[in-house]
Amino acid sequence: MNRIFVYAMFLSVTLLLSCSESSSPSKSNLTLVSGINRATVSNMAHFKNDVISSDEISIKVESVRILLSEIKVKLNGDERSVKNGPALFTVTDSSKTVEFASTELPDGSADKIKFEIHRFPASQLSDYNSNEVFSEFASPERYSIIIAGTIKEDNTDIPFEYKTEVVSNLNFDFVPPLTIEDSKNLVVKFEFQTDMVFKDKGVVLDPRDSKNKNQIDKQIVNAIKAVKL
């Protein structure tokens, strides 16, 4: 009787393990993460109200959120999807990275990763306006980028939030190509360059000044750089 019971228990455990292994998710071997380079920019000169002020000002970026879509990789000459649906490029800590997409790919060489800075179509707002991650991007304004931080002016920290609706297709070429292997997870870091957004020709652009918006938006689409980890 005891032998039958032990055999039955062994069979049950074997079946459970077998089911668990067959239903387990595939292992990613390409992971994309977001980070930031130089969270703070400062200068003795800055643009405010179309005038260059000589008062010292510094901008510290504490949070970056960028709505992305169409994340794809060119592998062995063919384009493959990395993530279906929207994704969020997120920075909340200058010392940490945040994964925003991953996938399992066959072995090969990848020479391009691309994605789109995205706005939700008006027809999709109701699909995401209750979503904890995407709700602020599913507002009537349909923002694509939201940046928060503080501005130090006259020894006072003043919070700011910069929102924009800019869209752009971003392409990142890799020379030499990235090597994708089944046994290794390749991590590619995409860094937000604060000084490329809030500085122009060495002068700080005050994000609170609406007259700086056009210039900031022109620079922001070129402010993400890829770094292989």
Image: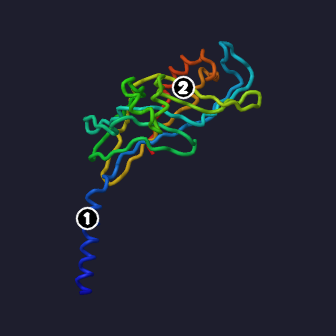
Q: Mark 2: which amino acid?
A: Lys
Residue drawn where x is 30% and y is 35% of the image: 74
**Viewer-side residue, 127 vs 105:** 127
- Looking at the picture, how far across and down is residue 58, in whole percent? 68, 29
Residue 163: numbered disc = 2
Residue drawn where x is 42% and y is 24% of the image: 168
Examine the rendering and report whether any part of residue 170 can be seen: no
Residue drawn where x is 53% and y is 39% of the image: 91
- Looking at the picture, how far across and down is residue 129, in whole percent? 44, 32
Work out which quarter of the rendered image holds the N terminus and state it: bottom left
Q: Mark 1: which amino acid?
A: Ser
**Viewer-side residue, 140 vs 14:** 140
Residue drawn where x is 71% and y is 30% of the image: 152
- Say whether marks 2 and 1 touch (CB < 8 Å): no
**Viewer-side residue, 56 vs 89:** 89
Query: Is 143 above or below relative to 108?
Result: above
Q: CA distance from mark 2 to mark 1?
A: 50 Å
The residue at which mark 1 appears reads as 18
Q: Is residue 49 left or right of residue 74?
A: right
Label whose residue precedes the other's in the sequence (2 or 1):
1
Q: Dot 1 lies on which element?
A: helix
